[in-house]
Amino acid sequence: MGQPINVVFTPSSKQGIYRFEVNRCLTGMDHERFRNDDEIIGDTPSDELARRLFSLGGIVGIHINSNMITVESDASEISTDELIRIISDLHLFYTDGVEVPSDDEIVNSDS
């Protein structure tokens, strides 16, 4: 359930910088910056995306503004395919290994 995000990778002239444009607004008009040593306690889409991206390792900073995402690596090579997969799957709830609830479970949970 959910819908994948369309992601377009744009190479940067700076080594270790990865830029992505997506078809969803993640922050409104705000800029959100995350560093790898920050504690991310929020539950916004950009907070969750930052947590997922940092879990890859090798990332020192993330900047998100509306539908633009910039990832800064620590000079280690990061797979752009893996970054794209993580961003694309942000709004997918039922991925491999996640059990989809039955209609009965959904109906009974509303009572």
Image: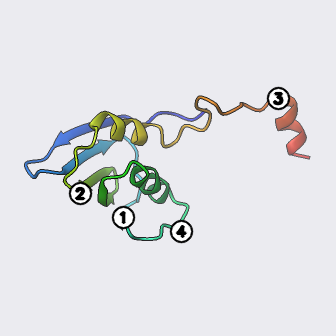
- SS at circle 3: helix
Q: Give x and y (percent) for residue 92.
A: 55, 37
Q: Which of marks 3 and 2 precedes in the sequence?
A: 2
- SS at circle 4: loop
- In the picture of the structure, the residue carrying the numbered disc 4 is 41
Taking the spot 81% from the left edge, 28% from the top edge, the residue there is 102
What crowding class fits label 2: few (fewer than 14 Cα within 10 Å), some (14-19), or many (20 or more)?
some
> In front of the other: label 2 or label 4?
2
Inter-mark Cα distance, 4 to 3: 33 Å
What crowding class fits label 3: few (fewer than 14 Cα within 10 Å), some (14-19), or many (20 or more)?
few
What crowding class fits label 4: few (fewer than 14 Cα within 10 Å), some (14-19), or many (20 or more)?
few
- In the picture of the structure, the residue carrying the numbered disc 3 is 103
Q: Which of marks 4 and 2 precedes in the sequence?
A: 4
Q: Give x and y (percent) for residue 21.
A: 28, 44
- In the picture of the structure, the residue carrying the numbered disc 1 is 36
Inter-mark Cα distance, 1 to 2: 10 Å
> In front of the other: label 1 or label 4?
1
What crowding class fits label 1: few (fewer than 14 Cα within 10 Å), some (14-19), or many (20 or more)?
some
- SS at circle 2: loop
Q: Which of marks 4 and 1 precedes in the sequence?
A: 1
- In the picture of the structure, the residue carrying the numbered disc 2 is 74
Inter-mark Cα distance, 1 to 4: 13 Å
Taking the spot 58% from the left edge, 32% from the top edge, the residue there is 95
